[in-house]
Amino acid sequence: MPKAAHAPRIAFSRPPASPRGVLIVLCDDELKFGSAATAMLKPVRALVAKTAKTEGFKGKKGKALELLAPAGLAVERLTIVGVGKAKELELKDWLKLGGTVMGKIPGPARAVSVFLDLPGPATKPEAAAEFALGLKLRAYRFDRYRTKRKEDEEKAPAGANVALAVADPAAAEKAWKARERVGEGVLIARDLVNEPPNVLYPVEFARRAAELKKLGVAVDVLDVPALKKLGMRALLAVGQGSAHESRVVVMRWNGGKKGEAPVAVIGKGVCFDSGGISIKPAASMEEMKGDMAGAACVVGLMHTLAARKARANVVGAIGLTENMPSGTAQRPSDIVKSMSGQTIEILNTDAEGRLVLADVLWYVKERFKPKWMIDLATLTGAILVSLGQEYAGLFANDDKLAKRLIEAGQATGERVWRMPLGPEFDKMIDSKFADMKNIGGRYGGSITAAQFLQRFVDKTPWAHLDIAGTGMAAQPSDINQSWAPGWGVRLLDRLIGEHYE
Ligand code: BES
Ligand code: MN
Ligand code: ZN
């Protein structure tokens, strides 16, 4: 996979006595520095105090104070970044802080030193690694299709060497080696979601997923004849109107005990969702290139797990299609038979994600008998109405799995909010002509979509994450400036790392 541009080079070092270039230090909300920074800043102590006062800088979380070429230090620029209450910093705050700091590094900067110490106990290696991850995620740009640089992008520090000063650089470096893999996975997911659909159609997506073989992941790409043979008629029906063939990709990482049942992660990979014959309005249709964010997350996650040699058996499976209107497209009123044998009446061809997932969920359950399955899908606009872009919708038939996902969400900042399931909702998708229809009524659209999926998981512990709000069209944040956030890689890496390794 092509490397993301603008990658800063990150290394850990002991605090330099007289840094050069761009210097960044952290302070708490009493304007106190860690001991190394305090000693190093001695020559500018009065100047810093005075400037802070003039600027009204109080060390609040995320706020910064800049001093250009301060007399007494050999640096071009000194930036002091507030962290608020130092004692209260959790890992997810260190991540954000890394992002904030990256955002303060000016474009032309080459040599950058960041002092990571704060008043109180030494900064932990895990915190330093999380900070570095924040730097890496914030520096990402998706600009491979620009032939001219935009002005703001010129300002992004493309070639900076960032030295992170900590008391124990070796320990921080070690922690960072593992976290860096997570960063790679997130950036792979972002790249896939940001790519335009004329480039990233199912066959090309499958080719990129197959690059995971280099890391020791077993990758099977199922083509149309193979999918027909398996009976994945629901998934194939979605792609039948497109000039691009559908694919299913199955990725297996066996880093756990031999013979132990795997866990499985399944992604919706609709490379472009025009709505099909039930075509979408023109406004914002371009966003539907991101309708494969679930699949992108699965590929990014598999990369991370393999690259960090996770001690777990994990199956990743993605359903790749393009939903287009044409003479061969499926129609409202068509009835298709899914791989499970259950029949589906298509009433709206724009409710296509659930058709894709129905067959992939069933296939994974039958073939791998996983301990649990989690699917990620940009499934419904309704989840944006419910939860905005802050939380993904979580639907689950298993309380333990739901709880673990909620906890992993709180720890990583990729938060999920549990939504209900139940027989009252399930009956809303009963059909007059087939076993079920692919849409519910006017209300509870995210729930009826989840009910539909549940009909294809049987008794397998399962969770569905509706990421229509969190997985694409991201607002710029401390840790992401691009359209695609790469949502879910950190969440699921954490879940697996905490409970299944
Ligand atoms: N991919 C869309 C859902 C979506 C909407 C994702 C906005 C991201 C942002 C999905 O395939 C879809 O079209 N869902 C329909 C379902 C409806 C026809 C029952 C929707 O949400 O309107
Ligand atoms: Mn749709
Ligand atoms: Zn869709």
Image: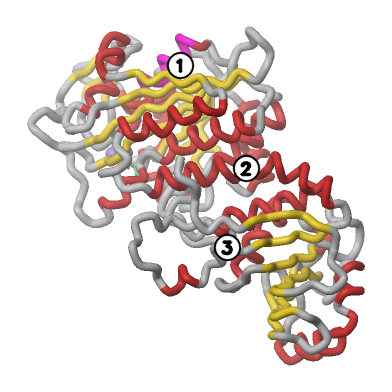
Check mark 3 vs ligand 1: CB closer than 8 Å? yes or no. no
- Read off the residue under disc 2: 409
Amino acid type of the residue that numbered disc 2 sits on in the rendered structure: Gly
Q: Residues within 10 Å of mark 1 (few under 14, many from 20)?
A: many
Cα–Cα span, label 3 and label 1: 43 Å
Q: Is residue 427 left or right of residue 254?
A: left
**Which residue range is magenta in the image?**
358-367
- Read off the residue under disc 3: 159
Cα–Cα span, label 3 and label 2: 33 Å
Quadrant position of the C terminus in the picture: top right
Q: Position of residue 404 (x, y in %)?
A: 66, 32
Q: Position of residue 359 (x, y in %)?
A: 35, 19
Q: Main secondary structure of the magenta part?
A: helix
Q: Is residue 444 left or right of residue 39?
A: left
Q: Quadrant of ligand 3?
A: top left
How many numbered markers are drawn? 3
Q: In which image quadrant can residue 179 be found?
A: top right
Is residue 420 in view from this perspective? Answer: no
Q: Position of residue 102 (x, y in %)?
A: 62, 64
- Read off the residue under disc 1: 364
Q: Nearer the viewer, residue 39 or 367?
A: 39
Which residue corresponds to the image point at 36% horizontal and 45% vertical from the top-left? 290
Q: Secondary structure at mark 1?
A: helix
Of marks 3 and 1, the one in the foreground = 3
Dot 1 or dot 2, earlier in sequence: 1
Of marks 3 and 2, the one in the foreground = 3
Dot 3 or dot 2, earlier in sequence: 3
Q: Is residue 325 left or right of residue 403?
A: left
Marks 3 & 2, CB-CB < 8 Å contact: no
In reply to whether residue 96 is colored magenta, the answer given is no
